[in-house]
Image (cartoon, grey):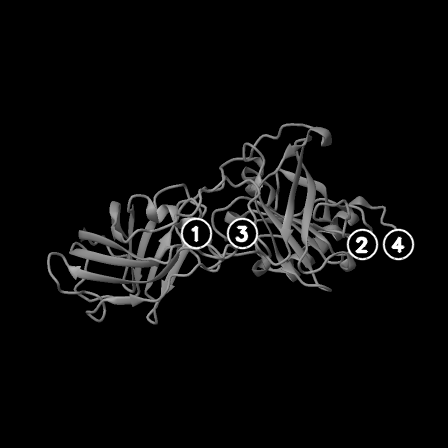
Amino acid sequence: MKLSNPVLRSTLHAAAVLCLALSLGACSRSQQVTSPAASAGRNGAGQQVLAGCPTLVANTPATADDFIVETGAIPNYVPGGRLRIETSGDIAGGTVRAAGACAASDVPTINFVGGHANVFVNGTTNSITTTGDRLTFDALLFPGALVEPGVVLATDAQGNVLEIIWPELSGLGPGSPIVRVELAQWNEALIGPLDKLDVAYDLVIEQDGVQQHIKGSCGAIPLDGTMIMPNAPTLPPCPTTLGSGGLVTNYSADVVQFKRRRMRFEVTGDLNGVIDAAGFCAASETPSVQFTGGMANMFQAGTNISVTETGQPILFDALTFPGMLLEPGIVIAKDANRNVLEIIWPGLAGLPPGAPILRLQVERYNAWVRTGRAVDFRMRFDAVGPDGQPASFDVVANNIIMPQQR
């Protein structure tokens, strides 16, 4: 049956998008496993969604703005199921990010009126879509705040999806907009699990009759879920040795969270740049620098009276990397009582660049610890460098005044 009524067509399209959003669900997004507000994961101010709607700059498909890709990944590849490709980034000036609250709204003032997407075998022009041609999508619509906040999406007749996700609006925390291309059907004979894929897409944004075109692409994305950073700066080589370690120089030290059942203490510091240099080599799927364990303790200031829950040092096994898709830029250890010892490399973790953050989080502590009292903190991070030599990095921070308990 041909639908000649444009209002009916629009209504049916919106209903289809709503059904698709319900089937995908909020948990289908690539979320961080740990939330900074409630866990030991990385934490920082990050960027917030910009206030007000951006003003679009008219252009044409031939002069489309480039979507500068920060990361690309295939978090879901199930032959006979779905193939999901995600790239994060923005155009110069941050227009897509700034448009989030204005587009993902029940009454949008900025609309993503359509787009295209194609997926290729890496390094070729062999499209893996069922027709071998690019996919065409109608307007990307907002499913509703109660269904799927912070997104707009469109689906075609085969069930393929073109979607934009604004992480802050979606409850995922700070992050650049994510463009998702999800195939419900594809030519499975063209690819195997060891192959890599290229993705290309374009989008049209409209505001008050002005249309701005965007195009993006990302190449050589592995099917195994590994995240790539195609425009990342060249990283320095891993240090050949960590030396023997030593006492960390503290640039800042403070209790950044003090609750009845949680205390988080952080030192920003380093030892002659060695810990910072080890970041990319430790927070890696194949680390050449391994943090093999550590220790922490807390004392009544100026004494040797421990105020941990047991009155004894807290011992930790190896600090491990959770994975690029889960929590980049950190290594972390947790003991049986959920106490945490962690190193965060801000530049690798998506925070503003800075010196390493050395974190201790304890779930329980001695009742002596109260607001206004002074505590001495100790941490030790044991490591093995690429040369196989052990090193220990000691953190000493004395007379830290406990803040107001919240």
Above or below, 254 relative to 292: above
Instruction: Compare marks 2 and 1 and give the one earlier in the sequence.
Output: 2
Amino acid residing under circle 2: Thr
Which one is nearer the viewer's eye here, 353 or 92?
Answer: 353
In space, the residues marked 4 and 1 are separated at their CA atoms by 60 Å
Q: Is 373 displayed left or right of 241 in the figure?
A: left
* Residue 40 appears anywhere in the view: no
- Residue beneath disc 2: 130
Amino acid residing under circle 3: Ser
Q: Which mark is residue 1?
A: 4
Select label 2 or label 1 by which is in front. Answer: 1
Select label 1 or label 3 by which is in front. Answer: 1
- Residue beneath disc 3: 170
Q: Are marks 4 and 1 in contact (CB under 8 Å)?
A: no
For label 2, the crowd category at 10 Å Cα-Cα, with few meaning under 14, some 14 to 19 and many 20 or more, is: some
Tell me residue 357's x, y (percent). Answer: 33, 49
Q: Secondary structure at mark 4?
A: loop
Above or below, 237 relative to 210: below
Q: Is 294 displayed left or right of 55 in the figure?
A: left
In space, the residues marked 4 and 3 are separated at their CA atoms by 37 Å
Tell me residue 23's x, y (percent). Answer: 66, 62
* Residue 271 appears anywhere in the view: yes
Q: Secondary structure at mark 2?
A: loop
In space, the residues marked 4 and 2 are separated at their CA atoms by 24 Å
Amino acid residing under circle 1: Cys
Q: Which mark is residue 281?
A: 1
Select label 4 or label 1 by which is in front. Answer: 1
Which one is nearer the viewer's eye here, 281 or 191?
Answer: 281
At x 68% / y 57%, what residue is drawn? 83
Tell me residue 125's x, y (percent). Answer: 76, 44
Instruction: Name the image quarter holding the N terminus.
Output: bottom right
